[in-house]
Image (cartoon, rainbow, N blue to C red):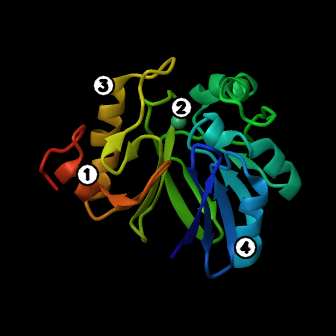
Amino acid sequence: MIEFRLVPVTPFEQNCTVLWDPATKKGAVVDPGGDIERILKVVETEGIKVEKILLTHGHIDHAGGTAELARRLSVPIEGPEEQERFWIDALVQQSQRFGFPKVETFEPDRWLKDGDRVTVGKETLEVYHTPGHTPGHVVFFHRGAKLALVGDVLFAGSIGRTDFPRGDYQTLINSIKGKLWPLGSDVTFIPGHGPLSTFGEERDSNPYVADGQR
Ligand SMILES: [Zn+2]
């Protein structure tokens, strides 16, 4: 099984997630956009041994704290997919544009591809490449817990923006319908912002992607 705690970070209240395997207490920090002290406090409170950082995509509110956290914890960075490189390389410009504290760029230790697997302790997450919001966006899925971490692909009642460079609306819709829906309507997802929901609930009521086919 897998356990998690959300840590809203940055002025954008991004859902950074501390995810761990309760059997070993080994864990991962997913999308450390910033507010590193707040993340580390949760890690300490829960007694988690962080062994890696996982990234869904390269936007500042998701990836801005990555370089510093990786250095402080001496852990590798896995994800996103390699087409995300241009966003990661642009982190400094992103931080200036949005008035974020100074950030550093970085090179992930492992770029991920569709169909890859990543481990958290003794647990395994499946990786899906879900472009549209950004070209190298990935989603992490724990099949046993029916839990998906979807970044800015899908939200409760909404979908990710597609007006950024190399974003594309139809590509995003295809990612949601082609990659997420087949995982099952009973899957709970952690979006990059806002409350948790299930794929079934979104298939019922999300104005962008509902099809009533839950
Ligand atoms: Zn984003």
For the residues bearing labels 2 and 3, Cβ distance under 8 angstroms:
no
Q: Quadrant of residue 52?
A: bottom right
Res 201 seen here: yes
Foreground mark, 2 or 4?
4
Q: Earlier in the sequence, mark 4 or mark 1?
A: 4
Q: Is residue 104 above or below residue 79?
A: above
Q: Is mark 1 within 8 Å of ligand 1?
A: no
Query: Where does label 4 land, which residue?
Result: 48
| Number of numbered discs on residues | 4
Taking the view exactly as shown, the residue that stands out farthest to the left is 212
Q: Where residue 106 appears, x then y in whole percent?
A: 78, 34
Q: Earlier in the sequence, mark 2 or mark 1?
A: 2
113 and 56: which is toward the camera: 56
Foreground mark, 2 or 3?
3
* 56 relative to 129 in the view: left or right: right
Q: Residue at x 61, y 79 (%)?
A: 22
Disc 2/disc 1 C-alpha distance (Å): 23 Å
Q: Secondary structure at mark 1?
A: helix
Q: Amino acid at mark 4?
A: Ile
Q: Earlier in the sequence, mark 2 or mark 4?
A: 4
Q: Earlier in the sequence, mark 2 or mark 3?
A: 2
Q: Amino acid at mark 3?
A: Gln
Q: Secondary structure at mark 2?
A: loop
187 and 64: which is toward the camera: 64
Q: Residue at x 77, y 63 (%)?
A: 40
Query: Where does label 2 land, which residue?
Result: 136
Q: Earlier in the sequence, mark 3 or mark 4?
A: 4
Instruction: Locate the C terminus and report the quarter of the image it occupies.
Output: bottom left
Q: Amino acid at mark 1?
A: Glu
The residue carrying pointer 1 sits among few (fewer than 14), some (14 to 19) or many (20 or more) residues within 10 Å by Cα, namely: many
Q: Which mark is residue 170?
A: 3
Q: Where residue 86 appears, x then y in whole percent?
A: 64, 22
